[in-house]
Image: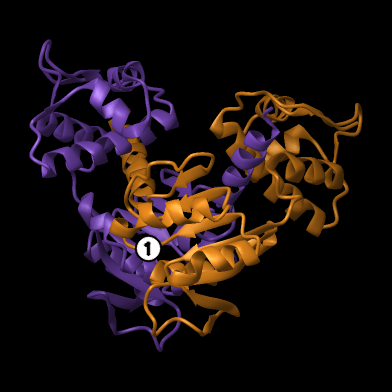
Chain colours: A purple, B orange
Amino acid sequence: MVETSQDDQVPKAVVNRMSLYLRELQQLLRSGRNTTSSTQLGQLLGFTDAQVRKDLAHFGQFGYPGIGYHCEELTSAIRRILGTDQDWPVAIVGVGNLGRALLGYQGFGHQGFSVVAAFDADSTKVGGRIEGIAVYSIDDLEKIVRRERIRLGMITVPAGAAQQVAERLARSGVEGIVNFAPVTLVEPAGICVVGVDLAIELEQLSFAVVSRNKKP
Amino acid sequence: MVETSQDDQVPKAVVNRMSLYLRELQQLLRSGRNTTSSTQLGQLLGFTDAQVRKDLAHFGQFGYPGIGYHCEELTSAIRRILGTDQDWPVAIVGVGNLGRALLGYQGFGHQGFSVVAAFDADSTKVGGRIEGIAVYSIDDLEKIVRRERIRLGMITVPAGAAQQVAERLARSGVEGIVNFAPVTLVEPAGICVVGVDLAIELEQLSFAVVSRNKKP
């Protein structure tokens, strides 16, 4: 039984765990499993079974008494919840080291995101392909974004250029932005922005280490 | 007045916002400001002033009546809370595109993390320097980690090699790991692991977009 509903206010941490459940379900399916349980999913990720059930309950009623979850059904449901059952053409703006790394990152395709265009201001980079993806001039951003119906943008330009790129992407119809530039963006109207500051990951880690070291 | 205390259970989202406050404070200091307020910090980041005060209250009593916060004092306090007042020599294991991007990432140094060594299994990459950082053979991991007193490791190897690398880093005395390989690691005993799955950022974004599109 799969009935999806949705809270208006699902905590970000819950949405994050939905991504983790999805990966474990995909792994179970690859290894030939048809069903699973909140206990098994919890064990794979180090959560309690109650946590797993509570997280899923934000979105509806899943699972069958005496059986648990059908892996394929729950996978589809989570993809629908996360929106990854839809097509998400993605553009990467800024073809430096990080842009190149993202162009070669296999994980996006596995989850249904297809990087279809890259942009750079450096004319020596424009016109070629990296990992099979065409690199366009930043001057053609609006034209290509509309033509390729690009819905998401990843910004990997220097900090000083990021806000302007975000606004140009928003005006061209992009619905969401992941910003890797080390600067906090003012969210253009009607668009979702997620910031990724890689130093923050290290700070979260140093916090965890010093907190643990303080414990008697 | 700066008295730092610490809850045992500070939510991850609060720790994350401490990193954001730190960046805004550093920016204010660079622009010559000596004091700030919860209202100003909140406005810069799109939070309410109550949120800022509540977040800081997890860690102690900051700020002065009629003045607000001394930027420099609060910066030092947050760096102490996050542990970035300490030295954190960092190693990057795996010199592919992402490893290269991380070696060139300026943001780590700005926050006090110094990348001091890189490792790779490919002998053609070993012996050189990238962005001034020496690339060692993965065979020398334990020796170099101990010699350079490396405390944190970033794993950018293929998924299949990540668990073994994590265990070798842990055995060599590394205290924390940021894992960029697209696989969930079993945490080696006594070590903190933070996973960064770049596709999860895109999923969080597609979730935000579809949630917003559903609203009337």
Q: Residue at x 48, y 39 (%)?
A: B189
Q: Does residue A88 lie above or below A134 as drawn?
A: above
Q: Residue B41's quadrant in the figure? A: top right
Residue hosting label 1: B157
Q: Position of residue A87 (x, y in %)?
A: 19, 50
Q: Position of residue B114 (x, y in %)?
A: 65, 64
The residue furthest top is A65
The crowd level at tag 1 (other Cα within 10 Å; few <14, some 14-19, many 20+) is many
In the rendered image, is residue A179 in sight? Answer: no
In the depicted structure, whether residue A87 falls above or below residue B215: below
Q: Where is residue A196 shown, x and y percent of the image?
A: 49, 52
* Quadrant of the rendering where the N terminus of chain A is positioned: top left
When asked about the image quadrant of residue A145, the answer is bottom left
**Residue A100 can be seen in this image:** yes
The residue depicted at 48 percent of the width and 45 percent of the height is: B194
Q: Chain ID for label 1?
A: B
Q: Quadrant of the C terminus of chain A?
A: top right
Q: Is residue B161 left or right of residue B195?
A: left
Q: Nearer the viewer, residue A112 or B112?
A: B112
Residue positioned 26% across, 28% down in the render: A41
Question: Foreground residue, B45 or B60?
Answer: B60
Q: Residue furthest bottom?
A: A124
Query: Compared to B20, does B150 lie above or below?
Result: below
